[in-house]
Image (cartoon, rainbow, N blue to C red):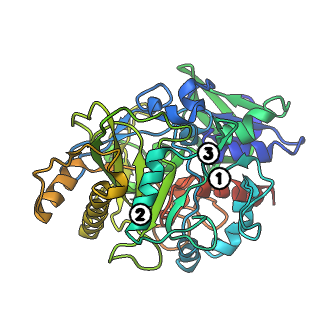
Amino acid sequence: MERFDYVIVGAGTAGCVLAGRLSEDPDVRVLVLEAGSAERTHAMTVPHAWPENFGSAADWGELTTPQAGAGPVAYTRGRALGGSGAINAMAHVRGHRTIYDGWAAGGAPGWGFDDLLPYFQRIERTHGRDPLLRGTSGPIQVGPPTAPHPLARAFMRALTDAAYPVTDDLSGANQEGACWADLAIADGERVSSADAYLRPVLDRPNLVVATDSLVVGLRLHHGRCEGVDYLRDGQPAEVSVQREVILAAGAIGSPRLLMLSGIGPADRLRAVGIDVSAELAGVGANLQDHPVVYTSHASPAPLPVSDYNNGEVYAALRSELATDCPDLHLFPILLPIAPAGSEPPATGFVLTAAVVAPDSRGSVMLGSADPRAPALIDPALLRDERDLDRMQAATAIVLELAASPAMAQFRQAQVWPAPNVGSPADLRTWIRNNVGTYYHPAGTCRLGDGPDAVVDVQLQVRGVTGLRVADASVMPVIPNAHPNATVLAIGERAADLIRS
């Protein structure tokens, strides 16, 4: 059996960071196992083409359990080098600093904003930002659009005309308001963590990246993780580890693999016929995501093609339920699309309402001991009534903005919700029936202390040696922003913890 110092499960956002950093030491051997392929397609490269990734070979193609009134919801996540960061919309935005300070105060000392700031700075290369808060020499070049789409300009104008706050940097000192958001785009192409951290070092003799390799179990012996079992092109294989196995398979993949290996809530494991190796009640619990609603509008003519990500501008705003930070995101999608199951207009655009500080909590569970069977994914969209209140407020705002004078030249008619959805009660029903997701799962291997914590502050799995988790699953509370920047910082922090 081949032996490595480190085995990284998943070449997603954090996994690529870990592979690049750990293999900097020529005296250690690093193996990365990725279920997807190494292909970098047109849709994964050209910024405006990212929607083409949905349903492609780079998408796990899963569904949730039934959500609110919408039924099962498509749950896109990346299956490729770079993971979801290779197929997402490239937004590079930190959560509000109070989110991370809440992690530290809630049982994860050393994970507050000031602790994470050096890692946020390490990952990014910005120009014209505050160098006390932003990075200037990292591997991932990020920046706002320099020639925004005319409809994005109109949306920004509608926000300012309505007196909503404006900021010049959602990752800077003022993290509230409408902003031209930083995008991970350089020279007209996406910059994923695979592009920045992994592909440039694939020639290192101590780094092996095995794609089309689905990890199906952890090899445990007397409480220690000694390797992994996987399928390479469908054929069984195994590898042993000298130092550590690091799970970076994401908020769905990491808890799923722990449970398949007997690490998790004992009653649920036994219910599907899995022997318990380590009882950890919190594995798969605490799933959080950002619910979204698409309001769809017809335009009098086809819109120009976006030079960026079909969005370009984001507004981080507060509902009446907000506490320490904005809890809503509003943004355009510069394409004629509609809520799932509805007919989109021939030409048009979407104004999106999202709840980014949700109170709802869901779960990831196993429906079967078969490692190739999909997990039972329940992000609990709008399950807490407060999230429905927030979404109703956000949807009302975007509908008002769509009808504003600033948007008049682009908006011919409101398509969804249908114009006869007029009363607040009707709007709430429509929202429940059409809710979707921002595809931001987090929290299922919670970092911290207490009976539901899965990993300690060193990211080590409780009760098992030689095993860590480093991805979005360790977040105790989801950031009120796109999580990719935070996952990159977790990967950098994890590399330092492991090397020390």
Give the residue pinned by disc 2: 159
Q: Earlier in the sequence, mark 2 or mark 1?
A: 2
Separation of marks 2 and 1 at Cα, in angstroms = 31 Å
Seen in the picture, residue 255 relative to 101 is either above or below; the reply is above
**SS label for mark 1:** helix
Give the residue pinned by disc 1: 488
Residues marked 3 and 1 touching at CB (< 8 Å): yes
Q: Earlier in the sequence, mark 3 or mark 2?
A: 3
Q: Quadrant of the N terminus?
A: top right
Give the residue pinned by disc 3: 13
Residue type at tag 3: Thr
Looking at the image, which residue is at 63% across and 60% down? 459
Q: Along the horizontal axis of the image, is 388 left or right of 113?
A: left
Separation of marks 3 and 1 at Cα, in angstroms = 6 Å
**SS label for mark 2:** helix
Q: Along the horizontal axis of the image, is 385 left or right of 491?
A: left
